Image (spheres, grey):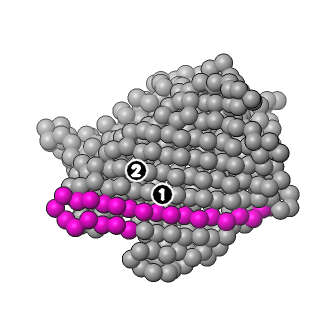
Amino acid sequence: MRSGLIMILLMVLLAGTLVAQQPADTLEYKVEKRVDLAFAEMVASNVLVWSFNRYLREDNYSFYISWRSVETNLRHGFEWDPNNFKTNFFAHPYHGNIYFNSARTNGLNFWESIPFAFGGSMMWELFMESEFASYNDLIMTTFGGIYLGESLFRFSEQVLDDRSRGWERFWREFAGTALNPVGAFNRAIKGDMFRHSSRPGHLRFPINGYVGLGGRGRVKGSDFGNAQFNPAIELTLHYGEPFREVEKRQPFDYSTFRLWRSEGQTDSTKNMSITGRALVIGKNVPGKNEQKHLPGLFADYDYYDLDLFKLGSFSLNGVWMSAFPLGRGFTLVTGPSVGVIILGAGSNEYYQSYQGRNYNFGQGYKAKLDLLLKHQKFGELFFDYGYFTLYSREGVPGVDHLNVLDATYTVRVWRSLGLGAEYTYYYRNANYDNDPDVKRTVKGIRGLVTLFF
């Protein structure tokens, strides 16, 4: 799993580098619709993953399946599983992305691809394991798979370019394959991977952001004193133009994506976070004095798997984005929101499963405030505050109140190179029905060296 996470990070960074080399001109995605191929690939992906687990893994007891195991699963129904955090909130969404893109890359649109994420997950839960089906797997594989699936589909489309040749074409196809393996498979069997054209042949939207290297910052906690951050790699992407007036907004034609990765103190595969927000439904609204607005329904994916704390959620949120010209070249972009957490999880001191699960499953609500103050010369100050309330559905009874703040300042100092600083704050107030309450605070600060694109 460690090498897989590093590979995904490297490919996303490569994608950002390649994106910077090409102009953005929005095109419509036109591929022959093949529902039969989409269904076949969804089923085949489950068979391949099952075969790997059954015949190559040592701990393969749950992959001995038969018609009796299927009957047992159908009779028993769903429950909550004991898997670790990474499996439930990262691996399952990534698996769901495979189902989703079996349809998306075969010509189906966003809405038409959703049943494949759900259907592939149901097939796996009921037919491909002898363990009982789980609620959390179905929810995160479906909803997380839709989110990651459309995001990775669009990032891979941004990288691919049918006009390119030689080594440029090789690296574009290589990056596109890493971002969207199912899409690469379909391009290969249809001959598109090797076909040259006078047009890009792929979706193009404006994209900008930066890759950052964070130093060994200082971190302080209410229960451990002072410590050090390990060096980290960060990626921030802004995809699309939220305030560009278009006749009809499409799902995910605007999104933000942030990834943060470093080596953990106790487990080298820990200390990775992914936060993303994408427009699902929305409409641009003009305002007074050159103000611009975009109200809509957005999907949020939050994944913090850190030594210091864990937090994962998928939520649907009502957001009102606005851009306010402040004069003297300054612009303030705001994005207050409130929404429903479909499924979430947070650290728990009183629960430990035999498979390493040390967190509650819960549902609740999320409030968030994004502020971005930007100036072409003086840089950008980004303020991202999220408040999560999770009511325990399974685990230790109680309610978690979680606060996560990230404040980042970046500025260009020479061409695409820049410097910055980042402050993070985490506060948890957990109120349990039958156990002592827990309050925990973590604060940290680090410097950044950034490469903008």
Decide which of 411, 195 is in the foreground and name it: 411
Name the kind of residue labelled 1 in the image. Val
Quadrant of the rendered image containing residue 188: top right
Q: What residue is rendered at 64% in x and 59% in y?
A: 408
Residue most toward the right?
415
- Which residue is labeled 2 in the image? 388
Label 1, label 2: how many angstroms apart (C-alpha)?
8 Å
- Which residue is labeled 1 in the image? 404
Q: Which mark is residue 98?
A: none
Decide which of 434, 168 is in the foreground and name it: 434
Residue 347 appears at what percent x and percent y? 34, 62
Q: Which residues are magenta?
A: 417-440
Decide which of 340, 207 is in the foreground and name it: 340
Image: 315 above or below 87: above
Sort mark 2 into few (<14), some (14-19) or many (20+) by Cα contacts within 10 Å.
many
Residue 150 appears at what percent x and percent y? 54, 37
Q: What residue is rendered at 83% in x and 62% in y?
A: 413
Residue most toward the top?
247
Q: Secondary structure at mark 1?
A: strand
Are circles 1 and 2 on residues that touch, CB within 8 Å?
A: yes
First in sequence: mark 1 or mark 2?
Answer: 2
Q: Is residue 198 left or right of residue 380?
A: right
